[in-house]
Amino acid sequence: MPNQSRLVAYNQIRLLFFVFCLLTTGLSAPVLAQWKVLDIKTGVHMRAVHAVSSNICWIGGTSGTVFKTSNAGKSWTKVKIPQGDSLDIRDIHAFDKNTAVAMSSGEGEKGKARIYRTDDGGENWNLVYQTTQNGAFLDGIDFWDKNKGICLGDPIDGKQFVVTTEDNGKSWQELPFDNRPAALPGEACFAASGTSILAMGKGNVFIGTGGAKKARVFRSEDYGRSWQVSETPMPAGITSGIFGLRFWSAKNGIAVGGDYKRTTDSTINVLTTTDGGVSWKLESMTKPTGLKECVAIYHKANATWNGDTQIRADNYALVATGPSGSSYSVDKGKSWSVLGTEPFHSVGFAGNVGYAVGGKGLIGKIDKVSTKKKRKKLRFVD
């Protein structure tokens, strides 16, 4: 009997240890702070968002409408682009609470391919660029610094349409036709989130495409003056391809995409690169599955000193958004977990604070994403 008692006690200890492991090894997804949906009393469809800081965020939408917050989303100021009721603001890049550049998507021949700039918080807007060329359709805009920026448009006469600025967006110049990268038949970019173009570093810029039989990534190292291109294994077609790009270092980056006609398809929709965009490989499928239009980087804040929040560059997560919901990855895109089911088109982070936008006035805010990796399941071996 003493041996029997010891066996019972041993089994009880094993059971307690197993329960403890279940509670501490992260076998299920960690509990997260979900998106806080902000009701700003509007039905405007929104795809453009730029978080300048945790407090300052600019958003663009249909009917030439722009929203801005300077108090972390507690209140929003609504402004209208003059004579812009027919305009769809698909991308916006802000520098502070006063200065921003907004881009409208639409047929150039109908007067909808425009770029505006404000330096007084949106009270007044100057039309700084417009093209009426047949086939012109602007897709996205980005800046390397306060002065130099680039705007991408669908191909015209077989070549990608590119315009650049060197004076903080006050004036724009079209890239000479001979310098523009050649496009495949049907190839174009998706103006879904403003992130099919990415400017970074000193002169590096990337463009992700779809629409043709192959999804490709164009890259330039000289502010868009000359280009190289790489094919990718991302599934592509008339309505599918690459929608969003992001890099977390000079060599390491990610691209997300899918099919905007089949937004919940269970197909691999993530590409990664480790050589600066020269080559790309299929990596994984997001959760929720389906089209992802944007990918951004959340950086964890580790402390605040003297009013300044210190951001840990080594502690981050990738966040991807799309019509089926948002996903996050803590292992550089190799695996994904569900972050929310809200149908956000685009998201922008300033450190640890993110703002996301979608249709019918949908705005979300989040300031905590789990950056802890799941531990391996412990197994008992007899």
Image (spheres, rainbow, N blue to C red):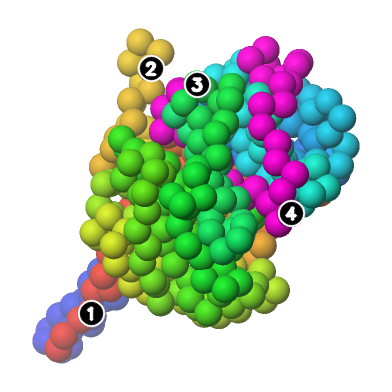
Mark in front: 3 vs 2: 3
> Considering depth in this image, is 241 or 342 the residue closer to the camera?
241
Select label 4 or label 3 by which is in front.
Answer: 4
Q: Mark 4 packing: few (<14 Cα in 10 Å), some, or many (20+)? A: few
Q: What amino acid type is highlighted by mark number 3?
A: Asp
Q: CA distance from mark 1 to mark 2?
A: 44 Å
Closer-to-camera residue (283/92): 92
Query: Which of disc 4 and disc 1 is earlier in sequence?
Result: 4
> Which marked residue is nearer to the observer: mark 4 or mark 2?
4
Structural distance between the alpha carbons of marks 1 and 4? 64 Å
Q: Which mark is residue 167?
A: 3
Mark 2 = which residue?
Answer: 308
SS under mark 1: loop
Q: Quadrant of residue 364?
A: top right
Q: Left or right of 253: which side holds 336?
A: right
Q: Nearer the viewer, mark 1 or mark 4?
A: 4
Rendered view: 195 above or below 312: below
